[in-house]
Image (cartoon, rainbow, N blue to C red):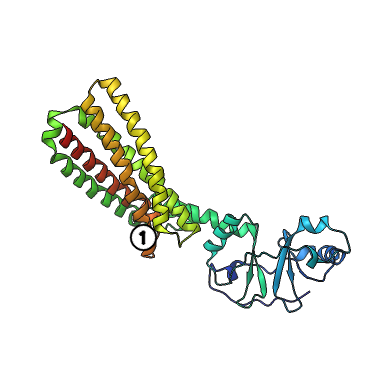
Amino acid sequence: MLKITKKKYPKNSAGALMTDKVPIAFLTSTIFEIEKYLKIKKDNFESINYIYAIDKVGFLKGVVSIKEVFRQGKHRKLEEFFEGELITVSPYKDGERVANLALKNNIKSVPVVNKDGKFLGAVLSDTILEIAYREIHDDLSRLAGIENSDSDHHTDKVSIFSSLKNRLPWLVIGLFGGFLMSKVITSFETTLAENLILASFIPLIVYIGSAAQTQIGYFIVRDLAFNPKLNFLVYTFRQFKITLLVALGLSILVFFSTFIFYAELAIALVLALAVFLAILSSIITGVLIPFIFQRLKLDPASASGPIATIIQDLVSILVYLLVAKSLL
């Protein structure tokens, strides 16, 4: 078999994460020869999910699962049935992109080839799952405002200073957002004083807008991770259609529920319209802000937490009070 030479690659790149301890076979190899090779070298392999088919000079030509190998007759050659449609990556490809590619295409390992197409190794399923787990964990940490935590993510091992540095800025932003929200509410004192019942529905309006924004934000962060070159206009239009239907359905439900319980047609109309507009506005905070972060080379997951939530809460309150002032 061909000898694969290794070199140093950047940390967290496909080249650094790959292993060359995987089965490779020439296109002209028979099943009998492959089985014999696997038995002799079995202790040297880190994985035998796939056999990588190469030519005499080491160019990767195809791949075949181990199950498929053992389904064939002993004298069949690898070139007769290998899978030629390849999903490969450069050794300089970022590890997260490799993991996303594997998960998207439902493959257990990703072959790594150089710029000429020569086989270098493969990033295995264990590594792919580890990267995916770490990425999800980091995203959740950022959403909670505790990004860049050390000590293997154990918060009891992180210094008090580091914890404050990671958490306090988000809380400060939230604090000022709360002050601004209270200022907005104060400016509508007359409207609220004339219709005290409106104040009791403020938490509902804030919640429904924030919940819609969180849902949309989660989806775009996930989709941007799989496809960084997402078409913004197409994606936004699709999300708009879905959100429009959600907003319409919930606003109708709110209208009839409010009218049944309070017998106030005007209040029911205000709440229904406010819910409709609050949910519809979540398109801006849920899609636009993470997309801007991604374009600025910043982590879009950060935008889906405190920043987008604060903006959405302010928008929801403002929309609600403006509708109430206009209709009552």
Question: How many other residues sit within 10 Å of disc 1, few (<14), some (14-19) or many (≥20)?
Answer: some
Relative to 193, 46 lies left or right: right
Residue at the image position 34 percent from the left and 55 percent from the top: 289
Q: Nearer the viewer, residue 50 or 136?
A: 50
Relative to 109, 186 lies left or right: left
> Which residue in the protein does label 1 denote?
293
Q: From the image, which quarter does the C terminus lie in?
A: top left
Q: Nearer the viewer, residue 152 or 269?
A: 269
In this rendering, the answer to whether 98 lies above or below 181 is: below
Residue 18 image offset from top left, x and y in percent: 63, 67
In this rendering, the answer to whether 21 lies above or below 249 is: below
- Residue 100 placement: quadrant: bottom right
Asked which secondary structure carries label 1, the reply is helix
Kindly tell me whether residue 159 is visible in this rendering. no
Kindly tell me whether residue 191 is visible in this rendering. yes
Residue 10 image offset from top left, x and y in percent: 53, 73
Residue at the image position 76 percent from the left and 78 percent from the top: 56
Residue 325 image offset from top left, x and y in percent: 15, 36
Q: Nearer the viewer, residue 188 or 183?
A: 188
